Amino acid sequence: MEDIKEKRLGKLLDATLFRHCETINLIDEFSLCDAMFKYLTESDVDKFFLCPLLLNVSKQEREEVFKVARKYAYLCFYEGNSDYWEDSVMGYTPGVPAELIAEEILDNYNFIVELAYEKGEEAVAELTNFVSEEMATESSIVDYLRHIFNNDQALKVSLDTTSKDNMYKDLSSKAKRVLYKHPRGVLYNEYQEVDEKDFMMLSKDQLFNKMFEVSGDTNILNMNTLEEVVDYLGDKYFESIIREIYLNNTNEDIENIGEKHR
């Protein structure tokens, strides 16, 4: 079976070339990608974008999903600018073929499309909370968050502010950035389920207990909301505690890997 990323890119390149041949330098592989990303955000090639999740939805529903996705497509590019698409993926060095970078950017855009379909525009809009100097990255914000979470479903659930179980929705953008920079062991835990990994979101009580274990401050256990905890601890101490929980979880993962190989 043809790889979905390769097939998605191929369809969009063909559509872009067919519709905008006169604006493209056919000798330069980057020129074709320049044009593709320009028109990707202008609705010109929506119907050619391959998203398996939308294969059986109505034309009207698909159009509504892409209307939202296009609005936030800039979050898939470095500094929010499609002109910088070559710099929009983590870990890719100069000399990497344009097609490989383009495939990953389109995969990030597919994440936005899926998020719009599954959780609605409010969840997609949550991504804008992370556009700041504090979250400055060497790629796009979507690429960064997907890498740091390493679990698309956990990221989608975290972004869903309409859920009654979402304890982060009323936090300031600054506090949210602290949590989303340190997600594993803080927002969710991963575990092995037969042949694949699954995840479980942490409850308020579980997170408060972890914060108490790190800080030793029993007052945390008597608070009702995460906003109260942030106000009580202050931004710097809150971030310090969250970072320590995250690092402890990371070290546990490394130790578990070591155990499996002994």
Image (tube, rainbow, N blue to C red):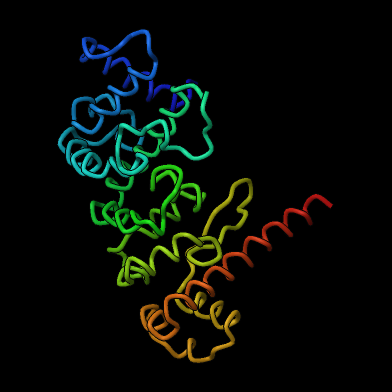
Lateral position of residue 167 relative to residue 97, left or right: left
* Residue at left offset 34%, top offset 22%: 33
Towards the viewer: 105 or 34: 34
* Residue at left offset 40%, top offset 63%: 177
Lateral position of residue 231 relative to residue 119, left or right: right
How many marks are shown on the rendered structure?
Answer: 0
Towards the viewer: 135 or 212: 135
* Residue 232, position as x, y percentages in the image: 41, 86
Of all residues, the one furthest to the right in this rendering is 262
| Figure quadrant of residue 70 | top left
Towards the viewer: 6 or 88: 88
| On screen, residue 28 above or below 196 | above
| On screen, residue 116 above or below 99 | below
* Residue 230, position as x, y percentages in the image: 41, 79
* Residue 226, position as x, y percentages in the image: 40, 78
* Residue at left offset 33%, top offset 65%: 173
| On screen, residue 213 above or below 95 | below
| Figure quadrant of residue 99 | top left
* Residue 10, position as x, y percentages in the image: 38, 18
